[in-house]
Amino acid sequence: MFDNTTTARTAHESHILDATLRRDTSFPQTELVVLVDEEVQLNDFEFERNGNIWYGEKNGMVEFFWWSETSDHEGYGGQAFRVTTSDGEEVLLKGPYSSNAGAVNKHGFGPVVNAIVTDDRECFEDEWTMNHRLCLTLDAAKYAVSLIDEDVELVKEQKFSSNDTYYLPHVK
């Protein structure tokens, strides 16, 4: 079992206001839903690259893409995203694909945890109206889980044939 007992006080704590779990009987996984004071915008992230994974982190929130110079550039319908690297270079990612927490963890970033994030309290309280998926750093997710009234833990699991690492919320 993964140890969730440590919640370091870091900058993300001032940005995460509340958290809950979303359970959908048609979907076998419980999802972490987080209310933040302000969603981080793409231009707020500084991205790093490892292979084809582009990773950015800010205030405990994480954004990432799968992109290479030689890919078909059809992800997100061919939409282009301008990102800034950690050394200040601006790069245009045309048609990147989304990725997943397991792939990001496998490429040495994070660890990260899948979450649904909003800065709109009304949407948070009626979580079926929101669906903005981001990831959180593991420390930020631990802090968010500590705000939930239920006794919740993050469980480390290996999933899929690629044996990717995920941290999933489970009620004890």
Image (cartoon, grey):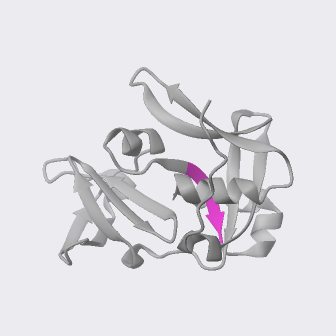
**What residue is rendered at 46% in x and 45% in y?**
101
Kindly tell me whether residue 131 is visible in this rendering.
no
| Residue 85 placement (x, y as % from top left) | 24, 70
**Is the residue 27 above or below the residue 121 in the image?**
above
**x, y percentage for residue 131?**
64, 58
Left-right relation of 104 to 141: left
In this picture, residue 151 sits left or right of residue 106? right
Return the residue nearer the eye: 6 or 137. 6
Q: Count of labels shown?
A: 0
Q: Position of residue 88 (x, y in %)?
A: 21, 78
Q: Nearer the viewer, residue 24 or 136?
A: 136
Q: Please give left or right for residue 149 compared with residue 111 in the image.
A: right
Which residues lie in the magenta part?
114-118
- At 60% from the left and 79% from the top, the residue drawn is 38
84 drawn magenta: no
Does residue 59 sit above or below 148 in this rendering? below
The picture places residue 124, in percent across and down from the top left corner, at 76, 66
Dominant secondary structure of the residues highlighted in magenta in the image:
strand
